[in-house]
Image (spheres, coloured by chain):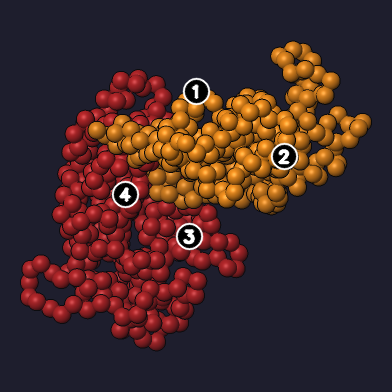
């Protein structure tokens, strides 16, 4: 499969110098054209920071300290997003990579009409477009996400939470980006609305063909909606595999813990088990594997050395990787 | 619109309550203010004036409080606020009418300049926080905590004097007659510079601080991040998204400060002996000039109410959330 976004050795710190907190460490992740990549982890695992980092939206004191984010446009050569100038970056944003944020309620500017907020993207990116066609495009996007176009002149406070998030999704697709990053887009919504919106999103993806990075702490959602899942812990990716593989046969004890913390819809009843302890303090990370203090299967090397993310020597040879001393990378491979 | 009418009804009620209080307060003052005034102005008050004083204070015994109250309203609508004692025999309405333009021009113009200047500087300081603009903060904190009359005294001490360009008191050269001519206007402007500067320096800091803080608060809102992510120009994000939202509390603060133009800068006018309303109020207080005080309080009350109404209207125009359909 063709990659559309490659994250290489991305490091993000909060703060500078000795007191800096490493929120994202050496993350390597590839998003392929047309796929839904799920990114899961507890609060504070660095998943949102990763999303903000790769779009260069980090608010101070967040700094990208290293790495590359290589974007592959459909027809022109690839480039590193982190090296774009301010003007290039502005042109890149939304046109190539759009984001839907977690705050469904606060993502829209309360003092401007929906129409203004939909069309100012077009005004910024396609200045030659006429007023009339801008409005037509905005109405069309509302229709795409299932909102009546006569809501164009509404203000955000006149819409429900679900409608606002749909407006945001419509806004994200208005320039037909290649990549849409969804940062917990449905956490503020009720379960029914959550499913509706996700179903709609999957349908739109099949129709328009964009790729999605879907960030959530709800692994059960990802199992259902994504093609591949990457699991983050303490700023690192600890396991990455196709969704069904993770669901059936997670290798990392942390992934197993996450999977064990929600009930399966079908199959035999089993006891739900949480993960004991709490996520690590990013300012004082444990030595070795950062999960070892909470890990039920920790043994000698875990506290001493950081496990490398790599392909474990699994018999079936599926494309997956894990960073765990229980599943060491065979020598010579990475 | 319904909301707007509700507000208007509320303000009419408040105005009625304030005016009614204004009617009753002199009648609650122990003793007889007219007698003490007659004693003070012995031989100078005509019997007509004394009668009208009695009517004004509601001390003409043969009439009920209710009919006095009706008369009082009738007088108000005719613009008749009684006679002033300090500026006898000038009617209160004329005394206030003479002083009001001075105050409105001096304080009104400086308040507007101060608001516009302070808010724009606050937008810049809030948007570019962490840069040179932060150097502005200690200075503004200092000036916003300095009382402006003290600043006025210092300004007179340092800048005004017999040989200085800045006159230390008054609203115009004593040799001139107020008129719209080429002698009077420059003199009036020259006299207003120092008080205006004093008010400006001490009030602009407050606007800078509050606008900067609101900008910082608003900058961390999700819709600002969304605006950046949308690839909008820096200017559009700063003005259309951040400043547009940060402005709201400042606008209501501005409308309220317009209400206090009339009474709020009393001390500056006193320090500079500026012939505005505050200076007149000081004289009225010193002379126990009840009609004049009553008149000035009435003007202050009305201007505060009108300013509040303006604040509501401005808010309705700027914030769609306060607009209600129907």
Q: Chain of mark 2?
A: B
The secondary element bearing badge 4 is classed as loop
Instruction: Quickly name the residue at label 3.
Output: A11
The answer to whether marks 3 and 2 sit on the same chain is no
Q: Which mark is residue A105?
A: 4
Residue A251 placement, left or right of A331: left
Tint applied to chain B in the drawing:
orange
Instruction: Quickly name the residue at label 2.
Output: B40
Q: Nearer the viewer, mark 4 or mark 2?
A: 2
Mark 4 vs mark 2, CA separation in Å: 69 Å
Judged from this view, the residue extending furthest toward the right is B163
- Indicate the chain coloured red by its letter: A
Above or below — where is A232 with respect to B179? below
Instruction: Quickly name the residue at label 1.
Output: B78
Q: Nearer the viewer, residue B252 or B209?
A: B252
Q: Residue at x 35, y 46 (%)?
A: A107
Q: Residue at x 29, y 77 (%)?
A: A275
Mark 3 vs mark 4, CA separation in Å: 30 Å
Q: Chain of mark 3?
A: A
């Amino acid at each position: 499969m063709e990659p559309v976004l490659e994250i290489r050795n991305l490091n993000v710190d909060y703060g500078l110098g000795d007191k800096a907190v490493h929120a994202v460490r050496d993350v390597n992740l590839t998003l392929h054209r047309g796929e839904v990549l799920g990114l899961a982890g507890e609060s504070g695992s660095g998943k949102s920071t990763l999303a903000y980092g790769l779009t260069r939206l980090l608010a101070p004191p967040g700094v990208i300290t290293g790495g590359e984010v290589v974007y592959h446009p459909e027809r022109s050569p690839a480039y590193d997003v982190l090296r774009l100038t301010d003007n290039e970056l502005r042109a890149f944003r939304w046109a190539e990579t759009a984001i839907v944020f977690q705050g469904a309620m606060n993502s829209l500017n309360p003092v401007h009409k929906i129409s203004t907020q939909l069309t100012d993207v077009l005004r910024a990116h396609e200045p030659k477009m006429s007023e009339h066609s801008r409005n037509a495009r905005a109405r069309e996007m509302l229709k795409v996400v299932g909102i009546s176009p006569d809501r164009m002149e509404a203000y955000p406070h006149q819409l429900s939470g679900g409608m606002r998030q749909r407006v945001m999704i419509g806004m994200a697709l208005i320039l037909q980006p290649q990549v849409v990053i969804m940062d917990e887009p449905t956490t503020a919504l009720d379960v029914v609305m959550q499913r509706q919106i996700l179903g709609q999103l999957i349908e739109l993806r099949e129709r328009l063909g964009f790729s999605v990075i879907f960030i959530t702490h709800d692994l059960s959602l990802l199992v259902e909606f994504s093609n591949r899942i990457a699991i983050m812990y303490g700023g690192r990716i600890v396991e990455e595999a196709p969704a069904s593989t993770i669901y059936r046969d997670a290798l990392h004890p942390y992934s197993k813990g996450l999977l064990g913390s929600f009930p399966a819809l079908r199959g035999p009843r089993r006891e739900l088990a949480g993960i004991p302890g709490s996520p690590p303090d990013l300012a004082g990370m444990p030595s070795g594997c950062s999960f070892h203090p909470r890990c039920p299967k920790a043994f000698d090397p875990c506290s001493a050395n950081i496990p490398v993310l790599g392909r474990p020597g699994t018999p079936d040879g599926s494309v997956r990787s894990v960073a765990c001393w229980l599943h060491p990378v065979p020598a010579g491979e990475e | 619109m319904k909301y707007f009418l509700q507000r208007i009804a509320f303000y009419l009620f408040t105005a009625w309550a304030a005016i009614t209080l204004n009617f009753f307060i002199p009648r609650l003052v122990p003793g007889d203010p007219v007698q003490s005034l007659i004693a003070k102005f012995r031989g100078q008050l005509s019997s007509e004036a004394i009668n009208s004083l009695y009517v004004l204070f509601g001390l003409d015994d043969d009439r009920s409080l209710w009919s006095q109250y009706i008369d009082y309203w009738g007088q108000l609508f005719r613009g008749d606020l009684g006679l002033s004692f300090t500026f006898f025999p000038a009617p209160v309405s004329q005394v206030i009418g003479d002083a009001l333009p001075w105050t409105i021009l001096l304080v009104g113009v400086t308040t507007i300049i101060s608001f516009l200047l302070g808010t724009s500087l606050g937008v810049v300081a809030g948007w570019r926080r962490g840069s040179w603009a932060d150097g502005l903060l200690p200075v503004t904190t200092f000036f916003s905590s300095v009382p402006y009359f003290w600043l006025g005294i210092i300004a007179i001490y340092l800048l005004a004097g017999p040989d200085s360009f800045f006159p230390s008191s008054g609203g115009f050269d004593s040799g001139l007659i107020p008129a719209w001519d080429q002698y009077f206007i420059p003199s009036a402007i020259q006299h207003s510079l120092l008080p205006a500067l004093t008010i400006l320096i001490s009030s602009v800091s407050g606007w800078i601080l509050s606008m900067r803080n609101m900008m910082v608060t608003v900058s961390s809102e999700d819709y600002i991040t969304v605006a950046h992510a949308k690839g909008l120009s820096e200017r559009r994000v700063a003005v259309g998204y951040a400043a547009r939202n940060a402005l709201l509390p400042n606008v209501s603060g501005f409308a309220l400060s317009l209400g206090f133009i009339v009474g709020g800068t009393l001390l500056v006018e006193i320090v500079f002996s500026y012939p505005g309303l505050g200076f007149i109020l000081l004289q009225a207080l010193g002379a126990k000039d009840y009609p004049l005080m009553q008149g000035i309080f009435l003007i202050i009350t009305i201007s505060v109410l009108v300013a509040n109404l303006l604040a509501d209207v401005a808010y309705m125009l700027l914030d769609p959330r306060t607009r209600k359909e129907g």
